[in-house]
Amino acid sequence: MSAGWSDDADPPDDLASFEVLSNPGPSDLNEYPQHMEAAQDKAKIKRRLVSAWNNVKYGGWSLKSKPRLSKSSPVCLLGHTYQLSSEGEREQFRRAFSSLLWLTYRKGFAPVGGSSLTSDSGWGCMLRTAQMLLAQGLLIHLMPEGWTWSGACHQTKDDLDVKAPQQSGRRNDLGKLWRRRSVGSPLDNVENTEDSTHRRLVAWFGDTPSAPFSLHQLVELGKTSGKRAGDWYGPSIAAHILRKAVAASEVPNLVVYVAQDCTVYVGDVVRLCEEPQSQCNTSIIILVPVRLGGDAFNPAYVECVKKLLQLKCCIGIIGGKPKHSLYFVGFQDDKLLYLDPHLCQATVDVNQANFPLESFHCKAARKMSFHRMDPSCTLGFYVRNRKDFDSLRTEITTALTSSLETYPIFTFVEGSGQDEHEEELFTSESVTHIAAKDKRKRSNKRSSVDDFVLL
């Protein structure tokens, strides 16, 4: 029995696992001493026990540890659709999914936010999913279109010739030992430009106070919103924290815009696009905090969420289950695909040269039924310039108004909104939201800041 992220019933066709890095063959295993194998087994068992405990305590218990995706249905991943019945497209999906940055609970880092906490297990999942959404926006902003992580290649290569030391007086019978390694391993002495940019981007999210998008930095920025280390962060507060973090960073030509009351003010976004920080127009990450229902997710919004995830400008959704944040990146049939931060891993020293990257990428797609989604979430979009923003408005408006059963999840309005700082002070974690045209009514138990905003 193993612990894992909880899933619902799966389709009959099974792709079993999306492991994309080749395992060493029998001849390679002979090169490792038995004591090294024992140490690795012990470390693996320890990681699984820690992961099991975190899942039982914070996420539930499941008998399955591998995903099951149907070959008969297309799968959508952040604006791209893959037919898993095709071996070629299945491999493309593996590489694309494994190239997403996966940021999870960590332990053993420096105390955060003036507290004694050296791990974020149990409280930092929303900040981790916010990091993942921002990381996806940065990958699009800095990497060429169609980039995939070299470590996601479904292959290994022989390129390191290690000679056995010669013993005096006789010839060494071992001759040469050949070692096989995964593409993109720390044994690479020379990285190309894309690999170097990818590594630098990962380092920006390292668990060190000096990293611009580290947990330490996000907690520090959250203090102005009344949050501190160990508190629960909601998707609305997380969106404003990301805006501040990008504004305080040195990332070129990028800003974050946070929508106000489910409204994107066109004048504000255009002004940001046309205020270049250099000779290039500024790109924008647009974050829209919404609430898709009352106390539970309204099924009427399923098709709208699917259409948004099919847009190439979409960089994902941070939400999840109550007090259990997940990063949604796609769907298949009526189930969401997500990255789960609820795995506690050891902190990686990103200040070291060629630090290992494997723990920052996930090789297994997880899924969850739409009806289990928490109604409070934040939608993310990336626009490179003013022309992209005009296209985004058209595509999103079409997606949001195609259903006659619901009000739009959010809207675009000409003009400018109120000051962003004032908006943040007004918005609580019970973010204002749009009610659907259904039988739901406002509960008298809700406070005034929880009231619905009706369009």
Image (cartoon, rainbow, N blue to C red):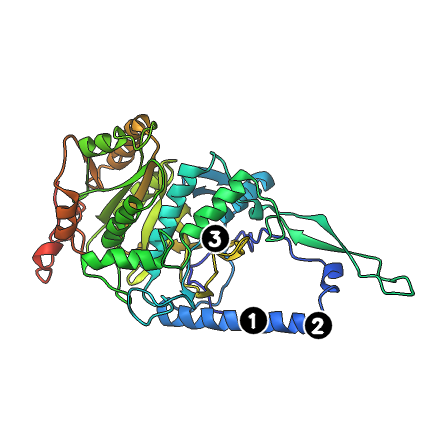
Number of numbered discs present?
A: 3
Residue 39's quadrant in the figure?
bottom right
Question: Looking at the rendering, in which quadrant would you find the C terminus?
Answer: top left
| Residue drawn at x 18%, y 46% as measured from the top left | 436
Q: Callout 2, which amino acid?
A: Gln
Say which amino acid is labelled 1.
Answer: Ala
Q: Position of residue 167 (x, y in %)?
A: 85, 65
- Counting from the top left corner in percent of width and height, residue 207 is at 40, 59
Name the residue tied to disc 2.
34
Q: Is residue 89 left or right of residue 323?
A: right
Indicate the secondary structure of the residue bearing disc 1. Answer: helix
The residue positioned 35% from the left and 43% from the top of the image is 250
Q: In this orientation, which residue lies closer to the viewer: 162 or 50?
A: 162
Instruction: State the mark number for residue 149.
Output: none
Label 1 to label 2, Cα distance in Å?
14 Å
Q: Which residue is mark 1?
A: 43
Res. 285 in view: no
Note whether 41 is above or below 221 in the view shown. Answer: below
Q: At 18% from the left edge and 52% from the top edge, which residue is drawn? A: 431
Q: Provide the residue designation for mark 3.
A: 365
Please tell me which of labels 3 and 2 falls first in the chain.
Answer: 2
Amino acid type, mark 3: Ala
